[in-house]
């Protein structure tokens, strides 16, 4: 619990309270405008409390994550020589691993030349050799 009362966490708690009260206040303001006849304000009157709920959800999730990390840090570590097998719980996130690169070798022997592709490559090489030329100047 002490971990949640550092200056950074106090700033997060204050920001959560200020944002939640501000969003709920803006929602109440939109309700009063909608009651006065502004029909567009009904949508905003629903939207602002949803924003407030999202702020509370993110704050709650971060507190939960910080408490879990604190419990893991305080837990005695087992023998460092023996690494336990990873366990997979229901609802846990999969481990992100490094992607595997697969090299692809071109097929040999059955290569059939594509005439359109060869002509396009000749056109590109001509354009590269003649940097000031326009595409209409191509002799081919």
Image: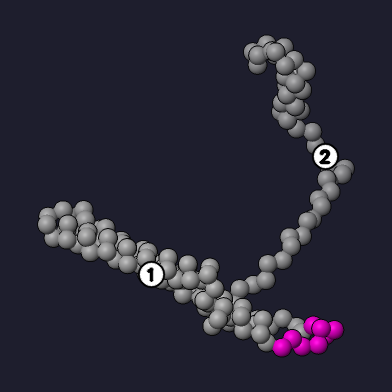
**How many numbered discs, if any?**
2
Q: Mark 2 Cα within 10 Å, few/some/many (few <14, many 20+)?
A: few
Q: Is residue 115 visible?
A: no
Q: Residue 111, which numbered label?
A: 2
Q: Coloured how?
A: one colour
User: Which residue occupies the extreme front position in the image?
Assistant: 7
Q: Is residue 139 left or right of residue 42?
A: right
Image height of 137 relative to 79, above or below:
above
Residue segment shown in magenta: 76-83
Residue 136, how many percent across, how many down? Answer: 64, 13
- For the residue pair 113 and 32, the one nearer the viewer reads as 32
Residue in view at x 76 percent, y 84 percent: 84
Is residue 79 shown in magenta?
yes
- For the residue pair 33 and 21, the one nearer the viewer reads as 21
Q: Is residue 66 visible?
A: yes
Residue 7, how many percent across, how many down? Answer: 53, 70
Q: Is residue 96 left or right of residue 64?
A: right
Q: Main secondary structure of the magenta part?
A: loop
Q: Which residue is under mark 1? A: 17
Quarter of the image with the N terminus is bottom right
- For the residue pair 127 and 33, the one nearer the viewer reads as 33
State which tag comes first along the sequence, 2 or 1.
1
Residue 124, how many percent across, how many down? Answer: 73, 24
């Amino acid at each position: 619990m002490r971990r949640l009362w550092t200056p950074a966490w106090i700033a997060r708690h204050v920001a959560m309270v200020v944002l939640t009260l501000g969003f709920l206040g803006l929602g109440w303001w939109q309700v009063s405008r909608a009651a006065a006849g502004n029909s567009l304000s009904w949508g905003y009157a629903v939207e602002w409390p949803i924003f407030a709920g999202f702020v509370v959800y993110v704050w709650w999730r971060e507190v939960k994550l910080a408490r879990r990390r604190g419990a893991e840090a305080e837990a005695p570590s087992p023998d460092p020589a023996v690494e336990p097998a990873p366990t997979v719980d229901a609802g846990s996130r999969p481990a992100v691993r490094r992607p595997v690169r697969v090299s692809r070798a071109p097929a040999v022997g059955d290569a059939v030349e594509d005439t359109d592709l060869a002509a396009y490559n000749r056109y590109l090489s001509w354009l590269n050799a003649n940097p000031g030329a326009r595409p209409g100047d191509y002799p081919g």
